[in-house]
Each structure stands twice: as structure tokens, then as C-alpha cells.
Image (cartoon, rainbow, N blue to C red):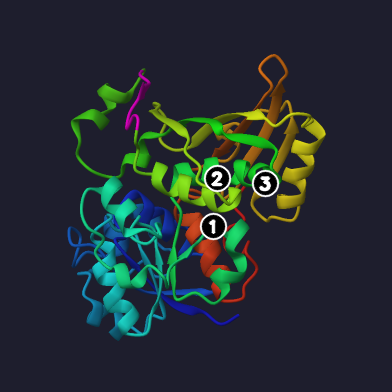
Amino acid sequence: MNRIKTAIVGASGYTGMELLRTLLTHPAVELTAVTSRAEAGKRLDEVFPRFSKARSAALTFCEPDPDLIASTGAEVAFLALPHGVAAEIARALLERGLKIIDLSADFRLRSPQVYEEFYGHPHPATDLLEEAVYGLPEIREEQIKNAKLIASPGCYPTSIILPLLPLLRNDLIDHSTIVANSMSGVSGAGRKADLTLLFCECNESARAYGVPKHRHLSEIEQELSIAAAENVTISFIPHLIPVNSGIVTSTTARLKPGVSAEQIEQALESAYADAAFVRLLGRGKAADTKMVTRTNFIDIGFEIDSRTNRVILMSAEDNLCKGAGGQAIQSFNIMHGFDQRTGLENW
């Protein structure tokens, strides 16, 4: 198997560390550059002792300079950077011939107006939006194969979009009644100093946040609208819970008249029976974060509430893996013609 020379830009955060954890042992990857302004000049195993003796452990963090990254021979770069920052370096690396897998929000939205509405500033690279592919492997595999710029989905959107898409495509639910409640581990907020994220603030506590207009709502509604072929607006309530990682989401919607549990199950099976990283639990089975953390799987179960004629979709994933780094590597595998599971079969 040919090894692809690869860079990670922004490799010292939680998502960057998840990318490192997988790419250091990926059989088709040769890491040639890892960047971090804060850790520049330090060896990889000095910053992350857990990677001591791993392949490429002696690699030194460098500044995120596009010329320097390109000079290492990197053919593809993962961008684990904040929104608003990623677009500039994405453009520079594209101009130098690299393929980009961006884990920020900069290229997820098709509309620059919606981006500005949700992120509070004008889009930094509107001319690249048409080129970007929303990199949800289960629904965009063919587009990902030929993409040069992949916008890897957010963690909450992945947990909400994947269970809902088959139901919307088959016209099984009233999309005006969709309500999604998600709970996420603290690592979802990133590796930063923040009073609200201190141990004593989060431990033994659970709270809603980002209500009523969390930023991820923009890409959720975009993708659901594409599936429904009309505008979809939903209620989304995210919560912070005292675990390191993992997202569990419960999404409800009113069933269209006459829709049965068998039709719901058939729609999910038809969409995902052959999907490498979707595990369908079936009716009456609740997804559990304990079963998916540190893996690239998303588990999906469902139940029917006959009293209210609503379907209850239950999903769980690791916010750093299927919701971030692992999913980006899944797209990397597709781009380069590898089996989607390559390097990601962590149980």
C-alpha cells in the first residue's frame, strides 16, 4: 500500500490529538508535518508522551506556514483549526497543490449569508464554497472520491442528520415537528482555558447551552433541507454533560399518517445496511456512548410513541472520532481509494 504524505495543521488540540492517534498507525499514511503555534519547536512525543515510540514520534511541531508544509512533500492536509482561521490556510495549501480535509465550519455551508448569520462575520473565502464537498461519507461517497476540498461535518450534525435523512427522503415524518436533544462530553468545547469548562464547573453537573441557535444548527438544517427537497427548520437543544467524550442524541418527529415501525426500520436498513460505520440497533434499543467512544461508529436505535404518533430516534457517537477526526480519516480513505475502514477499526 502506498503511503500518502500527510500534514495535520492544528495538531495540538483535542481533535488534532485524535487525528494523531489514528494517523500515526494508519498503514497508508506518512506524517510529514504537524503544526501548532503554541508547541512549535517541540517534538511530538514531548508534547504527547503517549505517542512515545510511535511511528513519527520524533516529528517536530512547526508553525502553520503553507510553504513549509508544502516543502515536506505533503499531498493532503487535515485542518483542525477554528472557524475563520482555516479558510486562509486552506486556500494557500490548495494553491500549492494539496488536497484539504477541513474540520472547521468554514466550508460546510453553501450560503455565505447563513455562515455570517451563525458565525458572526463574513465568510472568508466565498469563491471556494462551490468547490467544497460536505464530507458525510454515508451520503456523499461519490463526491468525496474526486474532491480537493472536503468540509468534514460537525459532531452534533452527524448524530442528528444520519438518523433523520432516510426518513425525510422517504417522506415518513412531518419535518416541521422535528426536535433534537443532544448531550456532549466536555472535549466538544475544545482544548482551551475556560472557566465554564473547569472540572469543578462541569463535574456532577449538566446544562443546556447555545439555545436557541447553536452554530451547528445551520448545517443540520442545510442537509435536512436537501434531503426533504424543501426548507426544514428544527428545534435543537444541546447539553453539556460531565464526561470526556461522546454524544448521545434523541430526536423526535411526528409520523406521517399511516407510517409504521416497519417502514422506519426498512428506511434505515435500506440506507445503512452496508455502511461501514453505522450500526443499526433496531426498534426499542437505545444507543449508549459507552459502546462508541474511541471508535468511528455511530449507533442508531428507534422507538415509536403510539400515544403521540412520534418516532424517537436515538443515536450515539464519539464527538472526537465519528464526530471529527475519525470521520475526516474515513473521507481520506475514500479520496485515495482505500477501504473506508483502513486505520479505523478500533473496538
- Residue neighbourhood size for the residue with mark 3, other residues' Cα within 10 Å, grouped as few (<14), some (14–19), many (≥20): many
Q: Which mark is residue 113?
A: none
Q: Quadrant of the N terminus?
A: bottom right
- Residue type at mark 1: give it: Leu
- Residue neighbourhood size for the residue with mark 1, other residues' Cα within 10 Å, grouped as few (<14), some (14–19), many (≥20): many
Q: Provide the residue designation for mark 2.
A: 161
Nearest the eye: 169 or 245: 169
- Residue type at mark 2: give it: Ile
Chain part drawn in magenta: 205-212
Residue 59 in sight from this viewpoint: no
Q: Earlier in the sequence, mark 3 or mark 2?
A: 2
Q: Secondary structure at mark 2?
A: helix
Q: Give the Cα distance between marks 3 and 2.
A: 9 Å
Q: Are marks 2 and 1 in contact (CB under 8 Å)?
A: yes
* Residue 128 x %, y %: 35, 72
Q: Provide the residue designation for mark 1.
A: 136
| Residue at x 46%, y 54% (from the top left corner) | 153
Q: Is residue 210 magenta?
A: yes
Q: Number of numbered discs present?
A: 3
Nearest the eye: 197 or 96: 96
* Residue 137 x %, y %: 58, 60
| Residue at x 51%, y 64% (from the top left corner) | 25
* Residue 38 x %, y %: 17, 58
Q: Secondary structure at mark 3?
A: helix
Q: Provide the residue designation for mark 3.
A: 166
| Residue at x 23%, y 62% (from the top left corner) | 36
Asked if residue 71 is positioned above or below residue 325 in the image, the reply reads below
Q: Earlier in the sequence, mark 1 or mark 3?
A: 1
Q: Give the Cα distance between marks 1 and 3.
A: 14 Å
Q: Main secondary structure of the magenta part?
A: loop
